Image: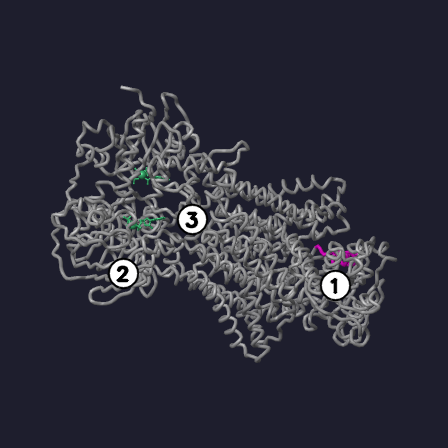
């Protein structure tokens, strides 16, 4: 039991429930299943992005280019769809994952082969990718009228009562869960985050593993590029601009340690969900939109403080007496 | 050591030639890049080589570069401050508030701006050094918090009507085409150069960046120094807020949006190691100049800002990658 | 130099509205013959980015700047500097404070727009009800002026319309979408969303469509026919309005050229704006181009092909 | 005489500026322990890394049972039947014990996924076979340092290998665990494995090794059978000269009490620790690894905050809140983890030395480089530091020389009390004698020295008085006169207490 409550995912889940209960107390409609499902659906994209970012952060790296990657892939897919509406959507989605993965691989190669710090690489590609959106589109937007109905409608369909978009998130989360807990690759992300030098001794190629992490975060960004564009039915240069920090915030709130090696799939999902619930609750309880930013900032800080409390390494305890007390 | 006194070996101060290593340094690479871009600009646009043009150019980067000076020190210690742009927003908003609420005179406005910056920096510093939270996370949080407070205060309003003498800080010229902003930046650059490279404080900053634990074990007050550096970054952001507000003549909560990444780009391009422990002020000043030259030069060709960012992004990666590729190439040949 | 160089500076590049305006500006330049048009602006709609654009235009010694400003005050110092260096400065669409320009071209009359956006909602709400406004950035000059005008006109002309909230989507499709969702969640009795911005109106209509609220909530406001046609077609909106952005860009270039050619901008002065007609400056040196034009199911098809 | 299982011949390896290995050879035989002996920086660990696929040799070949093989990765080495306990801990705090043992070669299910159940079971079996008393499902971070080391051993044994390499496996273990390790080595020998054993401790080399190979400065300088070779011969091969293993006579006159610590406590690490150290005295701290000695010292040094207790230095009550306060008061600490806490790798020698003394080498806060060089030269030369220049990066120095930089740094502050935490851990025999010699000099100059050490001969040879700690408590404080080693061991391990009870 005590072990259960030392688990930060539990605390985060409780915090989310607390917010929902508090808001419901004043606005009963908030916790209606339909509204909760809407929130889940609204948060789906952020959840997937947070998972991609988590893998990178686990390896002691950071991917600041995810939002730009998303915008670039999204613009490409929107333009392709506008030009060739007959291409089936599953092909487009596969294309997005490949393009996004390739952009991620570009980051990864620079990190792996040239050993440039990830924050520098992705700070550069953050601006480069977004600039390319402008270059390929000539600055023009692709709007709903130009997109094919399938392109827009796919994620809005529903399956067993849940929107397809939510299903995307569920499938991606399940894949990540298997990847991170059951495959050598997933475990090597943790290993190089916890102790990069020691990883070398266990036969892990640290550079290549980081490269793979960037490919994964890129592929997720690419997938979300399509989902984002078809959700908001507009592709422009400013799509998801500044969103990279929201993604990182979701990871941090979810207990992913920025120092690498610590973080779980459940944590990242809950971190994203927390932001989703808070953002959704504010307008409902009638908080002026001008308060929104300050509140989410404060939420991030509080989450970090609480996480750090849980993380204070209870190193080893020498005194017998203290051991009993603990 | 019974028999060592006879065989004491004399250790020379250094083996390498300092002049030679200066020639091969990062700064000299940046000087070459800067000259190259300057020449390219002069050829590409007939309007570039003009005293007023060059003077106008400096306005594009001085405020960011002022913050970059302090940010360089923060990054050298292995920390980062992403909240600088939001500090500008909050400081500018509070200046507008005291102006509109009490009709405060210019000196009070400047003081409010600077003190707000300092207070925000101290808040960051507190979270990082006392609560021991990672700075990248803390400042992502305060980035929303500070600007969020500005939004709460201002909502959809704006503050304007800044006095004429206040506007001088952002628009005035000290001499001919030399603006006050530029002079202030140059003075600050000299001060920061001395602070980082010529004082005990600077030496300790480098030691922290190289190995904070060992530095602490060596009697360096690591937390105190980090706290001071966050305050310093806040202070410079406050000063930048004064300049920017004076230049714009108005305050909106969205002021200075996105500055933080430009500032960090300058610092990194300037050769400061993002991992901490290495960097120089000269590099940062050169990097600021390079970014100013690139953006202004492309602006003269009416290249949209977003396309310029491709150039700065590429420049960042290429300039960092070049020495590495060079070294790899040399190793391969050896 | 023989050519007159006129810079058309917009809030942000890529926006369909401004691209249409640029088209009109090109037309005007071609018609005038000796005009070289520079179409420029930042990608993110911020004042700082616009100032950098203005600075580089000053350095290029263009003859005139015609700007749609992201902030009425922040651009003043930069534009004043431009005027000091002999550059003619006008603002259009979204204005600059009078000391920062020589004249301002309103797309339409502020009060008229304010009344129109409320009327668009009220026309389809015979018994009245709750409406909310989804605006652009909280700092957008023109939107704020229209909203003020709209608020002023409600009590006397539309007493049964109840304006419950004004929210800001920052002309960002995601933010606008979220704000629209928030409105719908917070105000169960909402009957109409008024979005006096081409980005916000599309986002709101998409949300209403997605949440199957067609018929319950009417989306209206200012919209580009080409972007908005589908929502008139599917019933998410009954009618929207807009002036012709092509004419707006066209007129702006004519006015800028007139100033470069030596005409004086003073209260009462009259300017010819080519095929659009002529305008007269009021006592703040502002002029209004034309009344907003209404689109509904009857005419959207035709106009969606034009802009 | 059988053929060797593993043969290395003509191996060379260079790093930028250092020739770590030069044409060395080595043979390992089934069922025998070969000791690899050499000073710090002789190239022992580098050789281990070339044998385990972590480094690629520049030259030379590796033969397993006469077959030349190449080892491009760590995994290929374990496939070739070579496993190692490395000098650096190859461990992951955030992962479970079982995963630490199997990371990189975890059992898989039919679908290629990691089979956690089998992994945990196998790991538990390996641990139990070593009598480690560790639960394989536990997170590694909850283990003490010695147990962690056992996990590292288990990791090496989890690979089915013919060649087992142990690079200073006993450096972090206490006597009890060392004994258990010896048993394990015997078992491996009986299994017919070839073992390479690296150690600086001659007693254990003579106890378990059959053969030896000696390296000096990256070259192989001798090999043979342990039982035919006396210790001083090996030492001579190793350092190129003969070295006395005699501890210097303590001739300092002991004066009045300098530092008095009373009732020092910490919520989880130690309680009611009281001791005093006098002028010109070496106070030894003995205990098993993990007894909490370092924690006490770090509290005295202001690094960790005690929950209670008082300290009086030369009559003045002090309460250092940070190392800076302690240094100002005149207490300095040479930490145990040299690389992490001692030297600032990445900075040159002179900056390391001057760091705590910047106040003295500067004028009103501004650096005076000439002063810094002078200060650094004075103290490093006194310690006979081996370096090419004062601007050499400390990371390029060998462990022993790094230790000298740390000591020089503190001497330059002219301290009253100097605390040395495991000052000779991992240091070769030549440098060790120098450090001991030097401690004698320090006390002769009137300093007080506190020496934390887990090595009995060192504690007994150097200390005037000895504080014994166990599980965070001071068990006894003894005068070092006619002390029997057994007494100390019994006190430290708590055996005496049990017998009494
Ligand atoms: N990665 C490296 N880069 C540069 N030099 C290195 C590297 N690794 C080892 N060296 C150098 O190679 C030499 C041999 O080092 P090695 O670690 O093999 O010594 P060792 O015999 O294991 O010493 P110890 O007894 O202290 O463990 C030393 O001079 C060391 O500084
Ligand atoms: N569980 C652990 N995880 C990580 N590090 C540990 C752990 N236990 C001990 N250490 C580290 O190992 C070193 C020795 O532990 P400790 O200080 O408890 O014992 P000690 O009695 O001082 O022993 P020593 O003789 O090694 O100094 C310390 O530096 C400590 O930080
Ligand atoms: Mg070694
Ligand atoms: Mg210890």
The label nearer to you, 1 versus 3, is 1
The x and y percentages for residue D179 are 26, 38
Dot label at residue C195 = 1
In the image, residue C168 above or below residue D66 = below
The x and y percentages for residue D379 are 24, 53
Tell me the CA gap for discs 2 and 3: 55 Å
Tell me the CA gap for discs 2 and 1: 70 Å
| Residue that appears at 26% across and 36% down | D38
Q: Which residue is mark 3?
A: B23
Label pair 2/3, CB-CB below 8 angstroms: no
Residue C15 located within the stretch drawn in magenta? yes
Q: Are marks 1 and 3 on the same chain?
A: no
The residue closer to the viewer here, B319 or A151, is A151
Q: Quadrant of residue B51?
A: bottom right
- On the picture, is B299 further left or further right than B239? right
Q: Secondary structure at mark 2?
A: strand
The residue closer to the viewer here, D377 or D182, is D182
The label nearer to you, 2 versus 3, is 2
The x and y percentages for residue B145 are 55, 64
Residue B66 located within the stretch drawn in magenta? no
Label pair 1/3, CB-CB below 8 angstroms: no
Q: Are marks 2 and 1 on the same chain?
A: no
Q: Is mark 1 within 8 Å of ligand 2?
A: no
Q: How is the image coloured?
A: one colour
Q: Which residue is mark 2?
A: D264
């Amino acid at each position: 039991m005590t072990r259960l409550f030392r688990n930060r995912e539990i605390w985060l889940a409780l915090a989310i429930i607390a917010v929902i209960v508090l808001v419901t107390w004043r606005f009963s409609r908030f916790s209606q299943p339909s509204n909760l499902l809407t929130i889940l659906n609204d948060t789906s994209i952020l959840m997937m992005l947070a998972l991609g970012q988590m893998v990178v952060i686990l390896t002691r790296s950071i991917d600041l280019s995810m939002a730009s990657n998303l915008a670039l892939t999204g613009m490409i897919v929107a333009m392709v769809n506008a030009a060739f509406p007959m291409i089936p959507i599953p092909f487009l989605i596969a294309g997005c994952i490949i393009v996004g993965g390739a952009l991620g691989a570009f980051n990864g190669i620079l990190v792996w082969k040239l050993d440039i710090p990830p924050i520098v690489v992705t700070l550069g590609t953050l601006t480069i990718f977004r600039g390319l959106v402008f270059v390929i589109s000539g600055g023009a937007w692709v709007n709903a009228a130009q997109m094919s109905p399938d392109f827009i409608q796919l994620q809005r369909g529903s399956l067993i009562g849940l929107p397809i978009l939510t299903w995307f998130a569920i499938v991606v989360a399940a894949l990540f869960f298997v990847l991170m807990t059951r495959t050598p690759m997933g475990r090597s992300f943790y290993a190089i985050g916890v102790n990069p030098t020691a990883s070398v001794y266990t036969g892990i190629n640290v550079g290549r593993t980081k490269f793979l992490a960037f490919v994964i975060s890129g592929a997720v960004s690419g997938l979300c590029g399509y989902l984002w564009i078809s959700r908001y039915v507009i592709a422009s240069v400013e799509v998801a601009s500044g969103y990279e920090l929201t993604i990182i915030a979701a990871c941090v709130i979810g207990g992913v340690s920025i120092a690498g090696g610590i973080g779980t799939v459940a944590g990242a999902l809950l971190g994203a969900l927390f932001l989703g619930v808070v953002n959704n609750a504010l307008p409902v309880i009638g908080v002026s939109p001008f308060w929104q930013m300050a509140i989410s900032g404060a939420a991030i800080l509080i989450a970090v403080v609480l996480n750090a409390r849980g993380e204070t390494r209870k190193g080893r305890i020498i005194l017998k007496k203290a051991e009993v007390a603990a | 050591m019974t028999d060592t006194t006879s065989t004491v070996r004399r250790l020379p101060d250094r083996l390498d030639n300092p002049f030679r290593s200066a020639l091969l340094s990062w700064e000299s690479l940046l000087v070459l890049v800067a000259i190259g871009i300057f020449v390219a600009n002069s050829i590409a646009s007939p309007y570039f080589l003009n005293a007023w043009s060059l003077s106008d150019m400096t306005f594009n980067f001085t405020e960011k570069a002022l913050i970059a000076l302090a940010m360089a020190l923060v990054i050298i210690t292995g920390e980062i401050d992403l909240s600088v742009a939001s500090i500008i927003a909050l400081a500018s908003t509070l200046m507008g508030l005291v102006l509109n609420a009490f009709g405060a005179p210019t000196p009070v406005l400047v003081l409010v701006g600077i003190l707000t910056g300092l207070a925000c920096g101290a808040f960051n510093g507190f979270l990082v050094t006392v609560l021991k939270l990672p700075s990248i996370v803390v400042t992502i949080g305060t980035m929303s918090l500070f600007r969020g407070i500005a939004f709460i205060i201002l909502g959809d309003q704006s503050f304007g009507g800044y006095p004429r003498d206040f506007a001088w800080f952002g628009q005035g010229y000290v001499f001919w085409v030399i603006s006050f902003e530029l002079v202030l930046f140059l003075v600050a650059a000299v001060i920061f150069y001395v602070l980082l490279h010529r004082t005990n404080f600077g030496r300790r900053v480098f030691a922290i960046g190289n190995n904070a634990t060992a530095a602490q074990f060596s009697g360096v007050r690591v937390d105190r120094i980090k706290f001071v550096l966050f305050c310093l970054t806040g202070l410079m952001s406050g000063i930048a807020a004064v300049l920017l507000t004076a230049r714009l003549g108005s305050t909106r909560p969205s002021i200075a949006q996105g500055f933080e990444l430009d500032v960090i780009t300058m610092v990194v391009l300037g050769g400061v190691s993002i991992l901490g422990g290495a960097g120089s002020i000269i590099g940062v000043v050169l990097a600021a100049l390079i970014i100013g030259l690139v953006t202004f030069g492309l602006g003269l060709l009416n290249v949209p800002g977003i396309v310029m960012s491709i150039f700065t992004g590429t420049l960042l990666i290429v300039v960092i990658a070049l020495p590495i590729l060079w070294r790899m190439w040399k190793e391969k040949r050896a | 130099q023989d050519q007159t160089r006129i810079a058309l500076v917009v809030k942000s590049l890529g926006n369909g509205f401004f691209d249409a305006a640029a088209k009109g500006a090109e037309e005007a330049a071609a018609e005038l013959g000796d005009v070289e048009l520079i179409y420029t602006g930042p990608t993110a709609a911020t004042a700082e980015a616009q100032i950098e654009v203005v600075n580089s235009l000053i350095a290029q010694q263009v003859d005139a700047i015609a700007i749609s400003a992201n902030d009425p005050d922040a651009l003043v110092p930069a534009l004043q500097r431009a005027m000091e260096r002999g550059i003619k400065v006008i603002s259009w669409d979204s204005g600059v404070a009078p000391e920062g320009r020589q004249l301002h071209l309103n797309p339409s009359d502020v009060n008229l727009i304010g009344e129109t956006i409320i009327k668009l909602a009220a026309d389809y709400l015979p018994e009245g009800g709750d409406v909310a406004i989804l605006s652009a950035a909280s700092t957008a000059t023109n939107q704020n002026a229209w909203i003020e005008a709209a608020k002023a006109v409600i009590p006397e002309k539309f007493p049964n319309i109840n304006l419950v909230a004004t929210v800001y989507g920052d002309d960002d499709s995601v933010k606008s979408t979220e704000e629209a969702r928030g409105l719908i969640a917070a105000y169960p009795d909402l009957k109409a969303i008024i979005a006096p911005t081409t980005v916000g109106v599309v986002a709101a209509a998409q949300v209403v469509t997605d949440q199957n609220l067609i018929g319950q909530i009417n989306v209206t406001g200012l919209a580009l026919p080409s972007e908005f046609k589908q929502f008139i077609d599917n019933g998410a909106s009954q009618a929207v309005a807009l002036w012709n952005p092509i004419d707006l860009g066209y007129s702006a270039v004519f006015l800028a050229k007139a100033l470069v050619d030596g005409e004086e901008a003073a209260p009462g002065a009259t300017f010819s704006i080519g095929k659009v007609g002529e305008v007269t400056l009021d006592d703040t040196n502002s002029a209004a181009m034309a009344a907003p034009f209404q689109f509904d199911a009857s005419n959207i098809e035709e106009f969606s092909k034009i802009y | 005489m059988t053929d060797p299982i593993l043969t290395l011949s003509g191996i060379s390896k260079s790093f930028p500026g250092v020739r770590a290995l030069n044409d060395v050879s080595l043979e390992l035989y089934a069922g025998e322990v070969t000791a690899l002996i050499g000073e710090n920086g002789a190239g022992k660990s580098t050789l281990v890394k070339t044998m385990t696929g972590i480094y690629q040799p520049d030259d030379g070949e590796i033969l397993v049972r006469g077959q030349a093989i190449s080892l491009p990765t760590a995994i290929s080495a374990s496939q070739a039947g070579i496993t190692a306990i490395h000098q650096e801990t190859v461990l992951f705090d955030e992962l479970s014990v079982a995963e630490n043992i199997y990371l990189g070669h975890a059992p898989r299910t039919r679908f290629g996924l990691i089979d956690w159940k089998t992994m945990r079971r196998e790991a538990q079996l390996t641990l139990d076979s070593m009598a480690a008393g560790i639960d394989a499902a536990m997170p590694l971070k909850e283990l003490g340092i010695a147990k962690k080391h056992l996990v590292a051993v288990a990791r090496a044994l989890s690979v089915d290998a013919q060649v087992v390499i142990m690079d200073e496996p006993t450096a972090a273990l206490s006597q009890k665990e060392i004994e258990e390790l010896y048993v394990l080595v015997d078992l491996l020998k009986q299994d017919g494995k070839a073992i390479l054993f690296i150690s600086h401790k001659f007693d254990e080399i003579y106890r378990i090794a059959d053969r030896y190979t000696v390296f000096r400065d990256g070259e192989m300088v001798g090999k043979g059978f342990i039982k035919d070779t006396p210790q001083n011969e090996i030492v001579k091969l190793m350092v190129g000269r003969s070295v006395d293993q005699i501890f210097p006579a303590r001739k300092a006159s002991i004066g009045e009490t300098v530092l008095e610590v009373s009732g020092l406590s910490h919520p989880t690490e130690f309680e009611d620790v009281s001791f005093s150290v006098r002028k010109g005295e070496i106070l030894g701290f003995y205990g098993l690894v993990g007894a909490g000695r370092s924690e006490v010292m770090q509290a005295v040094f202001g690094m960790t905050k005690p929950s209670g207790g008082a300290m009086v230095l030369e009559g003045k009550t002090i309460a250092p809140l940070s190392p800076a306060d302690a240094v100002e008061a005149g207490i300095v600490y040479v930490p145990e983890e040299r690389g992490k806490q001692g030297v600032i790798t990445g900075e040159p020698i002179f900056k390391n030395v001057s760091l705590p003394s910047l106040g003295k080498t500067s004028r009103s806060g501004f650096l005076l480089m000439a002063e810094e060089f002078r200060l650094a030269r004075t103290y490093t030369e006194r310690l006979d530091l081996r370096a090419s220049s004062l601007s050499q990066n400390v990371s390029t120095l060998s462990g022993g020389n790094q230790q000298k930089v740390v000591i020089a740094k503190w001497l330059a502050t002219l301290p009253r009390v100097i605390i040395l935490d495991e000052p000779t851990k991992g240091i070769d025999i030549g440098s060790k004698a120098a450090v001991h010699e030097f401690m004698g000099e320090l006390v002769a100059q009137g300093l007080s020295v506190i020496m934390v050490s887990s090595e009995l001969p060192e504690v007994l040879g150097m200390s005037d008085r000895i504080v014994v700690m166990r599980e965070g408590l001071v068990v006894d404080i003894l005068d070092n006169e006619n002390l029997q080693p057994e007494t100390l061991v019994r006190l430290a391990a708590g055996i005496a207490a049990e017998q009494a009870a």
